[in-house]
């Protein structure tokens, strides 16, 4: 177990050509990941890979769909979390959406898909829920991973802040801040520690090319894993008031 984790880390790190900063940022939790991680053992984590099936999401210039990248990253993240003792549930493990036959018949496939994702997440009562997407805009100049949380959800805000810090340390350069959001369906309807990761821009040529490589997908997965460890370890919490 220990050997496997160590070897895996070395491979992924070498492949990602990671910097000293990245190594430093990951040294502690990766060492911990070879054994059960106390912050994770028995915790329930839900990972929602954005899009799927007929809903491809955004598309890179070479035709690769967002849905493919989000699923690859979700599966890699699940492997890290499970290895450290968490109970992980993925809203999807294949190229499908979650809409029912009735939704399809009623031509409300997209709404049905989102509704079923929310049901799935809430049914598992997760300690942490990560929703994974990629960004895309008409201009090719924007890049960098971003986190979003539902405005007013304090747990979600703290999770998004910890995750954004981790992205700054571990992924392609980003100076972005976590964004409060009022409208995203899943963030509105899932209470507690829920945040959405836009892990990079498919409209940015270099970031899009990286997001399609197994090495960078593993780097994103490790950053998501580390974010959960940090969050459940209490990072970003207000200091406790001493008892009198
Ligand atoms: Zn998306």
Image (cartoon, grey):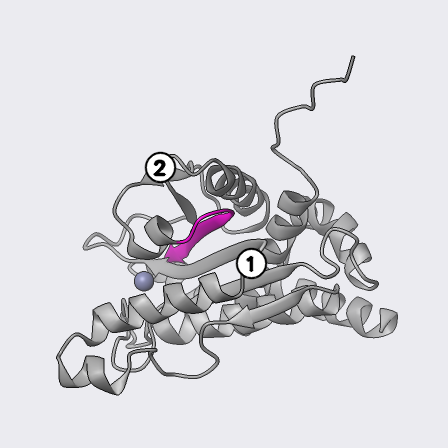
**Residue 8 vertical position relative to residue 162 in the rendered view, above or below:** below
- Residue that label 2 marks: 151
Q: Please report whichever mark, 1 or 2, sits nearer to the chain's N-terminal start.
A: 1
Residue 223 in picture, x, y percent from top left: 59, 54
- Residue that label 1 marks: 126
- Marks 1 and 2 sit apart, C-alpha to C-alpha, by 19 Å
**Residue 242 vertical position relative to residue 218 in the rendered view, above or below:** above
Residue at screen point 57% across, 56% down: 224
Answer with the quadrant where ligand 1 appears in the image: bottom left
Left or right: where 218 falls relative to 243? left
The answer to whether residue 35 is magenta is: no
Secondary structure state at the residue bearing disc 1: loop
Quadrant the C terminus occupies: top right
Residue 105, by quadrant, is bottom left
- Please tell me how many numbered marks the rendered image carries: 2
Left or right: where 189 falls relative to 54? right
* Range drawn in magenta: 190-201
The 10 Å Cα crowd at callout 1, few under 14, some 14 to 19, many 20 or more, is many
Which of pointers 1 and 2 indicates the residue nearer the eye? Answer: 1
Residue 46 in picture, x, y percent from top left: 53, 64
The 10 Å Cα crowd at callout 2, few under 14, some 14 to 19, many 20 or more, is some
Residue nearest the viewer, comparing 37 with 241: 241
């Amino acid at each position: 177990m220990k050997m496997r984790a160590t070897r895996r880390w070395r491979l992924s790190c070498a492949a990602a050509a990671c910097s000293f900063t990245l190594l430093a940022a990951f040294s502690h939790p990766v060492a911990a990941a070879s054994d059960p991680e106390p912050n994770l053992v028995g915790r329930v984590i839900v990972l929602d890979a954005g899009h799927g099936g007929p809903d491809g999401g955004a598309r890179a210039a070479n035709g690769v769909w967002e849905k493919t990248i989000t699923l690859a990253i979700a599966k890699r993240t699940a492997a890290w979390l499970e290895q450290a003792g968490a109970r992980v549930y993925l809203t999807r493990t294949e190229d499908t959406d979650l809409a029912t036959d009735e939704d399809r018949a009623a031509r409300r496939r997209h709404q049905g898909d989102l509704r079923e994702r929310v049901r799935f997440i809430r049914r598992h009562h997760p300690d942490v829920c990560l929703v994974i997407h990629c960004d895309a805009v008409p201009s090719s100049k924007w890049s960098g991973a971003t986190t979003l949380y539902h405005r007013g959800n304090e747990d979600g805000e703290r999770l998004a802040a910890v995750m954004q810090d981790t992205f700054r340390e571990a992924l392609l350069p980003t100076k972005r801040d976590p964004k409060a959001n009022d409208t995203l369906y899943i963030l509105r309807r899932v209470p507690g520690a829920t945040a959405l990761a836009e892990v990079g821009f498919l409209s940015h040529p270099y970031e899009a090319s990286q997001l399609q490589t197994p090495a960078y997908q593993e780097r994103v997965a490790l950053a998501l894993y580390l974010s959960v460890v940090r969050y459940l370890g209490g990072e970003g919490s207000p200091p406790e008031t001493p008892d009198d």
